[in-house]
Amino acid sequence: MRARLTRYSVRGWGDGELWTLGGVVLAHDFRFLADEQLNGVSNVLRARPHEEAQGSPSSTVATISSRMGNDFVSSHNRGSASSEGVTPEEIVRRMTDHLAGVEVPLDDVELDLAWATPFQRALAGELRSVRRGEVVTYGELAALAGRPRAARAAGSFCARNRFALLIPCHRVVASDGIGGYGATGVGVKRRLLALEGVSL
């Protein structure tokens, strides 16, 4: 079975790239528009047809994966990749609704975490349980995952998140303010939080 690539765009937000194998999400990257690119455009989906992936991803997903020291292709060839799950089309629909301000479930989408350490899996699980409209600090997230002194490790996990929005790292903030949001920037993090009713 080959990995499937689904590319899509959400007007006013940017472009998504979803990699799936069977019912499992291997990676989800979203390249957000910078503030100066927005120009008041409304949130409307322009979905593009999916493509069957022939090899490793060539986008930010691959960069993130290689930064984490993982082989994207081989790391997902075990587990329940043949299981039925939420379809790519449904995930795209939910992402579009989410970015339009609609509350939709994202925590039932199965993610490939075969590459993750037990602590990283715990971070992912705890973070996926942080509800819309709520935030946690990096220290609180680390404590929830069983390592209260590992705030820096929690921050590194968020910075390298290969499941944009599916693992909602924008809901993790610094103890003294909003904190960073990787290469995407704090402006996007503020927009995402504001969409969920959080003002920082």
Image (cartoon, helix red, strand yellow):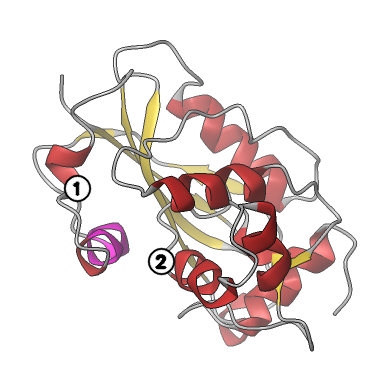
Label 1 amino acid?
Phe
Q: Is residue 136 above or below residue 78?
A: below
Residue nearest the viewer, comparing 129 with 122: 122
Given the current orientation, which residue lies at the most extreme left position? 54
Label 2 amino acid?
Arg
Total labels drawn: 2
Q: Which residues are magenta?
A: 59-65
Q: CA distance from mark 2 to mark 1?
A: 14 Å
Q: Position of residue 43 (x, y in %)?
A: 68, 55
For mark 2, give the secondary structure: loop
Residue at the spot of label 2: 160
Residue nearest the viewer, comparing 54 with 132: 132
N-terminal-most mark, 2 or 1 = 1
Asked if disc 2 and disc 1 are in contact, CB closer than 8 Å, the reply is: no
Q: Residue at x 61, y 27 (%)?
A: 108
Q: Residue at x 27, y 64 (%)?
A: 68
Q: Position of residue 98 (x, y in %)?
A: 70, 45
Q: Which mark is residue 184?
A: none
Residue nearest the viewer, comparing 88 with 149: 149
Q: Is residue 173 above or below residue 24?
A: below
Q: Is residue 147 magenta?
A: no
Q: Residue at x 68, y 60 (%)?
A: 143
- Locate the N terminus and report the quarter of the image it occupies: top left
Q: Which mark is residue 72?
A: 1
Q: Residue at x 80, y 40 (%)?
A: 103
Q: Residues within 10 Å of mark 2 (few under 14, many from 20)?
A: some
